[in-house]
Image (spheres, rainbow, N blue to C red):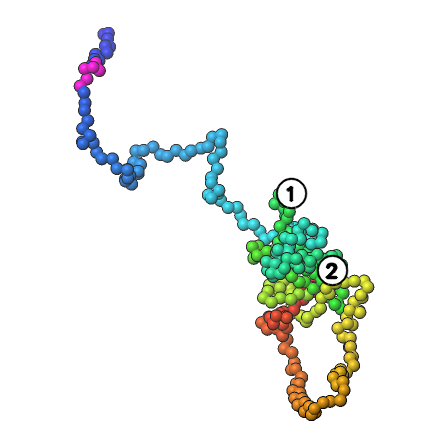
Amino acid sequence: MELILRPSPTKPLPHPACLPEWTVDPSSQPELSPSLRLAELTPSPACPPEMPLRPGATEMLPEPAHQLEGPPRPRPSLAELTLEPVHRRPELLEACADLINEQWPRSRASRLHSLGQSSDAFPLCLMLLSPRSMPGVAPTVVGHARLSRVLGQPQSLLVETVVVARALRGRGFGRCLMEGLEGFAKAHGFCRLHLTTHDQLHFYAHLGYQLSEPVQGLVFTSRRLPTALLSALPRASHPQPPFKAPSLTLGAPKGPPLPPPPPLPEPLPIQPPAGTPPQSLLETQYWDLRGSPIFWMEKVL
C-alpha cells in the first residue's frame, strides 16, 4: 500500500495595510519608578549560572588598593646595610646633620662643624646606610654614632650620639647599628666599649652592656701629646701665691678713720660623704650637666 505525504495548507497572512490600528492610552501605562526593588534584582533559579570572565590578550590587573600585600620584611641585617665614616661620604654630611638634629636640636652650622672633625684617628663618626633603591640615588642615612678614644684605656672606645631615624625606630636598626660598631671596634683592635644613656638602659642591657664607672673621652688625639701627659693634666696641682689686696691709700687719710670690717662668718662643718651607693637599673649616683640622671655602661667584646 503506497502512502503519500502532503503538507498541510498554510494560513495566508493578511496584508499589512489590512491590519487594524492599535492605539495605546498613556494613562493606562504603569508608572515607571527609578528605584529598583531587591526582588527585581535577584535572579530566578531558571537563569543560567554566571559565567566567569577570562582576560584575553590584555591582562586584567586588580587595583593597587585591592592587591595583596607581600610577606613582612624581615629584620634588617648588616648584609643589607653598610657602616661608613662620615668623612668618606661628604655628600651625605648634611643628611647626617639633619638626622642628629631631629633628636637633639642644635645649630646646623655647629653640627656640620662637629661632623667635619671626624677622622680615622678619632673621634670617628659612623653612618648606618640603607642600600640604594635605584642606581644614581644616594643611600638613606638610617643611623649615626660617634666613637672616641678613652683616656688611660688605649683598648677602649666611648660610644656617643647614638641615634636612629625617628620613622625607622622599632624595626631592628638600632641593634644593627650597635652590632656594626662592635664589629668595627674588634676589627681595629679594641676590646671594650663604653657609653652613657638616660632612658635606654634596658635596650643596652639586652645587648650585653653592664653598669660601669665613668670614663673620660678624648675630644682629639695627637702624636705630639702622648696619653701619659694627658692623663697627668687632671691630677696636676697648680699652687698659687696668696692673694694680697692692693692698697688704695695714696696719701694721709683725711677725716675720721673707717670702722673695722665685720667679722667673717664661721665656716660650716664639712662632713665626709657617706659611702656612695652602687648603680642599679633603677637608680644611679651620676648626673649630667643638666641635672638629669645618667647611667654609665660598658661591654667587653
Point 46% across, 32% down: residue: 55
Point 74% across, 84% down: residue: 248
The image's mark for residue 56 is none
**Image: 225 above or below 21:** below
Quickly name the residue at label 1: 136
The part of the image, by quadrant, that contains residue 179 is bottom right
**Image: 240 above or below 57:** below
Q: Tell me the amino acid under the disc marked 2.
A: Phe
* Residue 172 inside the magenta-drawn segment: no
In the picture, measured across the screen, residue 38 lies left or right of residue 88, that is left
Residue 266: horizontal and vertical position, in percent?
A: 66, 89
Residue 39: horizontal and vertical position, in percent?
A: 28, 39
Residue 108: horizontal and vertical position, in percent?
A: 64, 57
Task: Quote the CA–CA distance across marks 2 and 1.
Answer: 31 Å
**Image: 230 above or below 52:** below
Picture quarter with the C terminus: bottom right
Point 77% across, 70% down: residue: 231
- Point out the stretch of residues depicted in magenta: 15-20
Quickly name the residue at label 2: 122
Point 24% across, 10% down: residue: 5
Whether residue 175 is visible here, answered yes or no, is no
Whether residue 136 is visible here, answered yes or no, is yes
Q: Secondary structure at mark 2?
A: loop
Q: Tell me the amino acid under the disc marked 1.
A: Gly
Picture quarter with the N terminus: top left
The part of the image, by quadrant, that contains residue 197 is bottom right
